[in-house]
Image: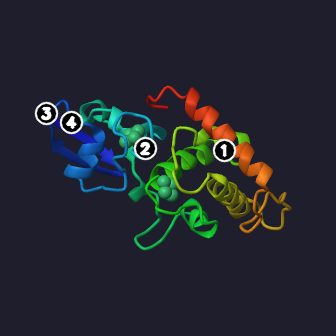
Amino acid sequence: MKVALRINGTLREAEVEPRKTLLDTLRENFHLTGAHAGCEHGVCGACTVLVDGAPMRSCLMFAVQADGYEITTIEGLAPAPGELSVLQDAFCETHGLQCGFCTPGMILSSHALLEREGSPSRQEIVEAISGNICRCTGYGQIIEAVEFAAERLRKANAPRGSALPHVGAPGTEPSAQDDAAIEHGILEAATAHDGGPK
Ligand code: FES
Ligand code: FES
């Protein structure tokens, strides 16, 4: 079947079998390999992309179901080649990644949160990334990255000279108690998650 997807602002077309997932179509037909194939059954979130701005697991969606929708992959977040978005840069600054396998999905889920909420609470960040599993970081620095990006974006968007509340900067490490609470919250949220598209 022929599908027409608007991917990162560009209309792309492909001939695919009806059973081909959006994940495989992005990776194999369009060579957008930032969406990672992890579990391939809706659990890990490594394949997360935005469909009309909402995080979706691309391993659980057929390409034909995405026909006509706006798809955003991690490759589409940077403002220009060789540059990083504010959120991507914050992940680097706060060491919000180690192996990087979960990172595209984490960033896209966090991006969707920041699009709808400029001052997310720590709990809102935990919930936003609760469908994304990270095996490396313990989540604390990922949450710090999202808080840091939110602060930077607020400053960038604030009228010149206005005062902004300080919400933490890179290097402001969460306490051991914070880390334990965050991990507990993530695990609870992940356990409660139904594994389907968010
Ligand atoms: S690859 Fe794990 S949720 Fe899609
Ligand atoms: S950085 Fe390795 S899985 Fe998250």
In the figure, residue 80 lies in which quadrant?
bottom left
- Which numbered disc covers residue 20? 4
Can you tell me whether the CB of the residue at mark 3 lies under 8 Å from the nearest atom of ligand 1? no
Q: Nearer the viewer, residue 129 or 133?
A: 133
Disc with the residue nearer the chain's start (1 vs 4): 4
Image location (x, y in percent) of residue 61 = 32, 32
Marker disc for residue 1: 3
Query: With 109 as the anchor, is 16 left or right in this view?
Result: left
Which circle, 1 or 4, is nearer the viewer? 1
Q: Amino acid at mark 1?
A: Glu
Name which residue lies at 37% across and 46% down: 38
Q: Report how far apart the C-alphas of labels 3 and 2 lie in the structure.
A: 23 Å
Question: Dot 4, crowdedness within 10 Å: few (<14), some or many (≥20)?
Answer: some
| Quadrant assignment, res 123 | top right
Q: Find disc 1 in the rendering and name its residue.
A: 183
Under tag 2, what secondary structure?
strand
Residue at 61% x, 55% y: name it: 142
Q: CA distance from mark 3 to mark 1?
A: 43 Å
